[in-house]
Structures are given as structure tokens and as C-alpha cells.
Amino acid sequence: MGKRVAIVGAGVSGLASIRCCLEEGLEPTCFERSNDIGGLWKFLDHAEEGRASIYQSVFTNSSKEMMCFPDFPYPDDYPNYMHHSKLQEYIKTFAQKKNLLRYIQFETLVSSIKKCPSFLVTGQWEVVSEKDGKQESTIFDAIMICSGHHVYPNLPTDSFPGLHQFQGHYLHSRDYKDPDAFKGKKVLVIGLGNSGSDIAVELSRLATQVVISTRSGSWVMSRVWDNGYPWDMVYVTRFASFLRNALPSFVSDWLYVKKMNTWFKHENFGLMPLNGSLRKEPVFNDELPSRILCGTVSIKPNVKEFTETSAVFEDGTVFEAIDSIIFATGYDYAYPFLDDSIIKSRNNEVTLFKGIFPPLMEKPTLAVIGLVQSLGAAIPTADLQARWAAKVFANSCTLPTTNEMMDDIDEKMGKKLKWFGQSQTLQTDYITYMDELGSFIGAKPNIPWLFLTDPQLALEVYFGPCSPYQFRLMGPGKWDGARNAILTQWDRTVKPTRMRAVGKAQRPQHFYNLLRILSFPVLLLAVWLTFY
């Protein structure tokens, strides 16, 4: 085996990192503080310190064809959107089939990661781990941090005057598990993200009254998109990405807002975002508009202050006799085992090249996997990040100079502000980001070459969903089954919903969609020629 690599966390990012290290001839050791793999997706009926936590009713927001490991499709009969238990089953199967469990040290806490005194020469790190009360110090050649960003709750109690005198119960969504304890209660949910919306909808069936307080609003999307297909298999395509980036911004923004308002008019539900053209991650909830129409959930603006029993909103209205407040206010980044200045190397902000490598490090021997967020699935993103990082550690790839990396970070920060607004999260456009990573390791699909050599596959790659298989189609790490997986992805999508077969299974018609999209500018041109 080659260089020794320490991996912190055995969730999907950690498992991807173990596998990618093995592909590059590296020697991985993964430290997992719990007794099982899965990270975020390993459900427990109580929240544990230092671990991500989910509630019992969680389902995925990405469909199965878009969120698999790129060479490991889900079984045909798996539903398109999975309960957390089903995804955990898949994760365990992946780890067993790829023989990854032998590289994991369970119930082992990483308490410290520090540069060795010889770091400027060797790039090595000292990792202090703890198991059964005993500490052990080990030297590693590289580090992959895969501990996630849903661990340390952001509970902004200082932002809400009067909260200290509130006599009811309040908690962070991290501690919410099921709705039983809230039966017959009046509940205020603060925050209109995926967790806040899920919890509010679930509570609305048992609680007396549920109110969501939102500071800035949000687009709400259904998982069921055009013609009943999964949203991401229709929306996350190379052709759609090309249009979004090629069209003038005012046209792109107008089309985006129009599309987001297709399902229902957000203005009428109090959900309209303050800046609707920003590409912030929308809320995925199939039931929220219905719950609002039925009067079991209400939307209110930001809370101005709390009293002993009530919440006063910024519009002057009051929600009285509140029993419980649930703060669905997100999470903070924290790596307590690592010096903050390594990740936040400038202005106390997370400063990482492509969201992975600290640009000011003398030796590129530390990578953060799974921190970047996009309107795409976490598993294929983490897989591609880990492939690149492992190649850098194995000296198969080299990073740009420090100045080039800092310039790229500044450029991406400007684009992030334009597209996503001010935010602490590392947000990016999914396809653009994946292609950037793929180009570093020679795994970016060569679309012109595909059109010349395999037109059938090229049409599906360019106009169809940008599924994970595309990034194991060519180059290093190529998977022989990638072509077939791409050409049969719609079959696996339709199979679990066609339990009663009536007629022939339908799939999107790429040329029809292309003609429909092009018809709008043609119509405008016809109108212009008619009148001018």
C-alpha cells in the first residue's frame, strides 16, 4: 500500500473517500465515532452529540437515479424517492460489496489533527484518536475530512428578544424525531427550509395550530415535476444548464421565476422569496401548499419579539398561547479537532479551492469532502471530490498555484453572490461544478466526441438527466456499465410506479422538449417581423 490517509467520518463522503483511496493505491483508515456507517442517514430515536440527526419521516429530495454512487445503481424496484431506512440499506450494501468496512475504526473519536513538525517537508499530520477512554497518536500522510455539515445546530436565541421569558418549550429541529409529543399543541416553526416545512406539515395533522415564521420566504417545489417525472431528472440536464448560462440574465431570471410559479402562485400563499431570481435551494415539499389551503399551516413573517406565551411578528400580528417553538434554523460549520485557521484562512470565512482544498497550505495533503452544496445530490458530488483528492494525494494530479487558486475562489465568490445571494454555505451550480472536477481528472464527458461516435448515448447525456453515471463514462475510473446505465435510467425510474401496467411506459421526448423551448424565441421573432 502507498501513503496513509486518515478519513474522518463514515457517512457517504467517508465511504466514497475510502473507495477512491483504494483505487489510487493509498492506505485509508477511517475513524467513525458511532457504531455504524451512514452518517446523516443512520437514524436514531435521540440526538447524539457530535453526530448528524434526522427525524423518523425523512425522505430523500433527490431521486434514486440522480443520487447513486456512479458505478452502483439502486435496485430496479427501489422507489424514486426513498425513506431514510431504504437509503441506509443501499449505503450498507455499497460498503459491503466494495469491501470498505475493514478500513473503518468504529466508536473512535478524532480529538485532534495537527501538522507534524516536519510538515513543510513531508506534509504529514498527527492524528489523535480516542476509543474506550484511551488515546492514540498516529502519523498520516494526508487527511480527508468527511464529518458533514449537519452536526452543530445554529440556535440564534440572541436574535429573538424576549425568548428568555417564554414559558413554553423550545428546541432545534435536530432534536425533533416525531409528532406525537405535539398532539393538541400550538406550535411555531421558525425557518422555511426543508426541515421546517417537513416538520410543520407533519405536525399539522396532530397539532391544534401550526405557524411557520420565515424571514425571506422561499420557492417551494414538488418532487413530482413535468408529466409526473422526478424533478431532478427533468430539471438537472446539460441542455437546461447551457440555456441558463447562455441566455441574458434578465431572460434567464424571468424564465426561472415563471417556472417556480408554475405549480402555484407563491404570492398568494405568503411564500414568495424576497429576491425571487436568486438560485437559492428551493424547499421540496409536496404537501405544504395543500396544508396552507386547508388552514392547518399558516405562513408569517419574521418574529419581532416573544412574550411569556406569544410571538409578535414584524407585521404586528400575534400568535398567542404557544406551547412549543421549533427552530429549523440550520447548522454551523465546525471542525473542533482542527485549527480553524486552516479552513477559514481569510476573513474568518471558509476559504477552499473548489470547496475542497485549503489554498494557502504548503503541502496539498488535506481535503474537505462533502461541504459544497448545490441543486444536485450529495453522493455523486462527494464521489467526484474524493476521486480528485485521492489523485492529488497520490501525485497523479497537481493543484494550480496558490495565486491561481485564490483568484478562482474570488471569482466563484462573485458568482455565488450573483446567483445565490449572501450565505454562509458553499453553494454552486451542480453541473458546472461537476464538470470542473471531472476535467481535473479526465472524467468530464466529451460531448462532441460522443455525438460523433455514439449519437444515441450523446442525446441522452446532453438532453437527458445529468446522472452520476456520466462521470464514470470515460477517463480514469471508467465503469464499463456506465453506458448501459444511462440508456436504461428511465426504465428504472418508471418500474416502481408501474405496478399496474396500462399501455406502454412513457419517457420524455428530448426533441419535443427542444422544439417547445425553441418555439418561444421563434414566436417573438415572428411578432417582431410582423410589426417591424
Image: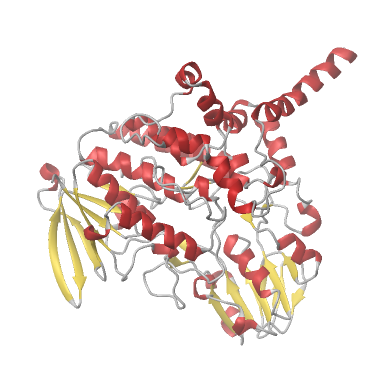
Q: From this viewpoint, is residue 45 visible?
A: yes
Position of 235 compared to 24: left or right? Answer: right
Position of 360 compared to 245: left or right? Answer: left
> Which residue is at 32% across, 70% downward?
34
> Which residue is at 29% across, 42% downward?
389
> Which residue is at 32% across, 41% downward?
387
Residue 173 versus residue 27 in the image, above or below? below
Total marks in image: 0
Residue 69 versus residue 8 in the image, above or below? above
Q: Position of residue 245 (x, y in %)?
A: 58, 30
Q: Looking at the rendering, in which quadrant would you find the C terminus?
A: top right
Task: Say which quarter of the image contains residue 523.
Answer: top right
Task: Say which quarter of the image contains residue 227.
Answer: top right
Q: Position of residue 202 (x, y in %)?
A: 65, 71
Q: Position of residue 159 (x, y in %)?
A: 57, 69
Position of 331 compared to 220: left or right? Answer: left
- The way the protein has been coloured in the rendering is secondary structure
> Which residue is at 23% across, 46% downward?
22
Q: Position of residue 358 (x, y in %)?
A: 31, 45
Q: Residue furthest right?
A: 531
Position of 77 compared to 111: left or right? Answer: right
Q: Please tell me which residue lies in front, 395 or 98.
A: 98
Q: Residue furthest bottom?
A: 167
Residue 497 versus residue 413 in the image, above or below? below
